[in-house]
Amino acid sequence: MTAQQSAPGDPICLVENHTGQGLAVRQDALQVLANITQPVVVVAITALCRSGKSYLMNRLAGRRTGEGKGGEGGGWTLCAPMLGFLSSVDQWLTSTVLVWGCRDAELSRPAPGAGRQQRAELWLFCPAGSSPEAERYDLLRECIRQFFPQRRCFVFNLPASVRDLQHLEELPEHRMEPEFLRQLEKFCCYIWESSRAKSIPGGCKVTGKMLGTLAVTYVDAIQSGAVPCLESAVTALAELHNSAAVREAAVLYQELMEQRAELPTETAEELLELHEQCQRETLQLFAERAITADVERFRLQVEAARLQFCSRNEEASREKCTAALQELRSEMEQRIGDGVYFVPGGHRLFLGDQQALVERYRALPGKGVKVGRGAAPEKGGKKMHWMEHRIRGYEMAKKKWEAERERDARKLHWLEGQIHEYMKAKQEWEAEREREVERLQQMEDQICRYEEELQLRKRLGEEEEEKKPPLGVWSSTDVQ
């Protein structure tokens, strides 16, 4: 059940076994699997080389001939419209049906009262002996019992004569043993009818791309020395696949919302209903693609996208409301500029026009969720509805202007009084200054007269001293 509807191609090596390097997954094979987007049925065929793996794989795929790959290590895959086939490697971890081929003559020996299926069951439980070769033989049968709890055994006779076996794939059917062809038909019908799409724990069906991821996980585990673990592989696959499913779902949600949402919506509830509708459709896609029920991650991604649409819805509404308000404002400003309201009765006319503009604004369709909620652009960090602020506040602004004008008149009168007092005080100060200058001048004049008088007295005193006679000088001898 793959997406490949054309004729099957040649076998492709999926897992290579490099000498000295170990196993490696081929990228070209992963690309082939990545192109298969539908669930796949995986039939794994494992056996010793040259034991008919390629022949069975080709016949199950509806091919008569095909390139045999016997003798080469690793895993080979062949994609057909209904099945995917793997061969030549331990594939029970990645397959839906495992075919284990072996050659043993004991299976052909008749057993009294037992059919072929019963003979095969007896063969599985009969010990072969204690020699090393017998122990290896018993180990093989033990593996079949353990790995095939539900099993069906098909015993094939030789398909043709020994001479024709070398060219079996080119041998026409009329030259093959009829009993072998009947056994082969039963085998193919059983595989076709009993095989089902491969799934992993949780019920998720595996696509070709997911199968490639599982193969890479197993090979990486083997290369690192660990034991391949189905739970770890499923966890890694779930993380990878769920992340891709979330991305795809988010893209689908975005596309659906872009197609159906006509922004701005009239109400927030309208956008919410559309979101829930798109989320249900997107959740269906996510549930089909996701491996585990990781719905929480999906809801977080969708919720982030929803918030973006809510923001865009509000912005579209804000722009629509702003444009409507701008148009109404320009009409009102034109009438104010023309002086329509600066006439007797202009205030009453203004109030009537104001109410008419409000009604026109409310009647405009398609304004969205921001109508009446501060739809005007933000300025200075404040949201302002222009109509509410300009039209309804006109009368208050007028009264405020008149009050301010009265305050300015009182302030001007007070300033004029202050200026008058200042001028009066200045005049008094200048008069006092002039009087002080006169007093200082008088004092300077008095001082000058006083100094002149002193100079005169001094000269007169000196002249009187010069006019007095000289005094006589008497000695002691004259007295005797």
Image (tube, rainbow, N blue to C red):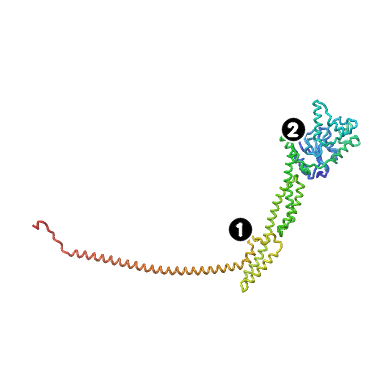
Marks 2 and 1 close (CB-CB < 8 Å): no
At label 2, the amino acid type is: Thr
Is 415 placed above or below 154 here? below
Position of 319 with respect to 65 (left or right) is left
Q: Quadrant of residue 218?
A: top right
For label 1, the residue is 381
Q: Quadrant of residue 70?
A: top right
In terms of sequence position, does the residue under pointer 2 or pointer 1 come before the other?
Answer: 2
Percent x, y of residue 377? 64, 60
Image quadrant holding the N terminus, namely: top right
Q: Nearer the viewer, residue 13 or 361?
A: 361
Q: Secondary structure at mark 2?
A: loop
For label 2, the residue is 19
Cα separation between marks 2 and 1: 73 Å
Q: Residue at x 88, y 31 (%)?
A: 108
Is 291 placed above or below 308 here? above
At label 1, the amino acid type is: Gly
Residue 113 seen in the figure: yes
Q: Secondary structure at mark 1?
A: loop
Q: Nearer the viewer, residue 164 or 434?
A: 434
